[in-house]
Image (tube, helix red, strand yellow):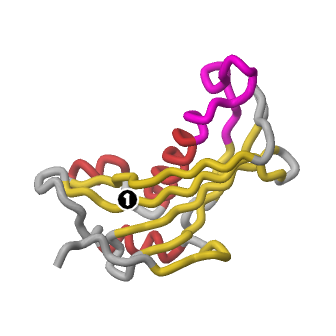
Amino acid sequence: MALLEKQFEAGWRDVDMNGHVANTTFLELAVDMRVAFFDSCGFRPQDFLKYGFGPVVKTDLVEYFREVLMLERITLTIENGGFAPDGSRFRVVNSIYKEGRVLAVRVTTVGGWLSFKERKLIEPPDILKRAWSQLPRTEDFQELASSLRK
């Protein structure tokens, strides 16, 4: 079964001079959640190197709702915000909750899959397309246009 949420604790290295979790930490946690999700679906991090491609981000949007402080426990979730029929583009939404399921941060990422050799966007293997189909869809899910040049 696919991993759809994961717990973390905000540590010393995660906070900024204001005493709350830094914005870059939320982006890194969102990436950690996505890698853990793919791994739970049978696509290990090493498989990106094996198959010669990886995710590439076009846009990250970080929305803040509540402050997260050091040593607070947080839960990250992952949802499918959009997907191209051929799988070449995706929109993934990671929500970050404080204890009591209080929404603190939402990270929305739009991206695609980059071939390391050809340096162009590609269609991912079927295992990743199947993984995306296991994700719950956001309320504003939208089908995305393909990233492939025809």
The answer to whether 54 appears left or right of 78 in the picture is left
The image quarter containing residue 139 is bottom right
| Relative image position of residue 41 (x, y in whole percent) | 45, 64
Q: Is residue 64 above or below residue 135?
A: above
The image quarter containing residue 73 is top right
| Relative image position of residue 101 (x, y in whole percent) | 83, 53
Q: Residues within 10 Å of mark 1 (few under 14, many from 20)?
A: some
Q: Residue at the spot x=79%, y=37% of the render? A: 67
Count of numbered marks: 1
Q: Residue at the spot x=67%, y=39% of the render? A: 8
| Relative image position of residue 26 (x, y in whole percent) | 60, 40
Q: Is residue 70 magenta?
A: no
Residue underneath mark 1? 43
Q: Residue at the spot x=55%, y=69% of the render? A: 80
Q: Residue at the spot x=23%, y=48% of the render? A: 49
Q: Helix or strand or loop: what does disc 1 sit on?
A: loop
Q: Nearer the viewer, residue 62 or 5?
A: 62
Q: Is residue 84 above or below residue 110?
A: below
Q: Which residue is farthest right?
A: 100
Image: magenta residue range = 8-26
Q: Nearer the viewer, residue 74 or 93?
A: 93
Q: Is residue 127 above or below residue 113?
A: below
The answer to whether 39 appears left or right of 69 in the picture is left
Q: Is residue 22 magenta?
A: yes
Q: Nearer the viewer, residue 74 or 82?
A: 82
Q: What amino acid type is highlighted by mark number 1? A: Phe
In which quadrant will I find the C terminus? Answer: bottom left
| Relative image position of residue 128 (x, y in whole percent) | 37, 68
In which quadrant will I find the N terminus? Answer: bottom right
Q: Is residue 57 above or below residue 145?
A: above
Residue 75: tell me if it is visible: no
Residue 117: tell me if it is visible: yes
